[in-house]
Amino acid sequence: MDAQTLTAGNGAVVRIALYLLVFWPTVGYYVYWDSVRREQNRPIARGIAVGFLGLAGLMLYVFRRDYSNR
């Protein structure tokens, strides 16, 4: 695989790879950290699950976190 193939489509492959390698672990770590701080059950499992879902998981987690205490 050469550089021409990786940058095809204005670098779509590179952008997707960076998204998967940077954004998802960051989301997972944030959820883990927040779960530990709030003393919720199984923070590691929450971090992995929400991190795996990416942006949709983060929105779901924040929505459930904010509206479950009301």
Image (cartoon, rainbow, N blue to C red):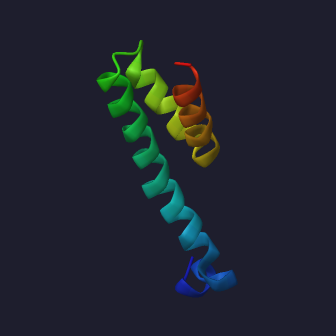
For image coordinates 52% across by 18% down, the residue present is 69
Question: Does residue 29 appear left or right of residue 67 in this picture?
Answer: left
| Image coords of residue 11 (percent x, y) | 59, 80
Residue at 62% x, 35% y: name it.
60
Q: Nearer the viewer, residue 45 or 37?
A: 37
Q: Position of residue 14 (x, y in %)?
A: 54, 72
Residue 48 relative to residue 52: left or right: left
Q: Nearer the viewer, residue 36 or 69?
A: 69
Q: Which quadrant would residue 56 be assigned to in this image?
A: top right
In the rendered image, the vertical position of residue 17 relative to residue 3, given as above or below: above
Query: How many labels, in total?
Result: 0
Left or right of residue 33: residue 53: right
**In the rendered view, would you say 36 is above or below 26?**
above
- In the rendered image of this protein, does residue 40 appear above or below residue 62? above
Looking at this view, is 51 or 64 the one in front? Answer: 64
Residue 13 occupies which quadrant of the picture? bottom right
Q: Quadrant of the C terminus?
A: top right
**Residue at 69 percent of width and 82 percent of height:** 9
59, 7: nearer the viewer: 59
Q: Position of residue 35 (x, y in %)?
A: 38, 25
Furthest residue to the front? 70
Question: Which residue is drawn at the image coordinates 39% and 24% (left, top)?
Answer: 44
- Image position, residue 38 (x, y; %): 35, 21
* Residue placed furthest toward the top: 41
Q: Quadrant of the N terminus?
A: bottom right
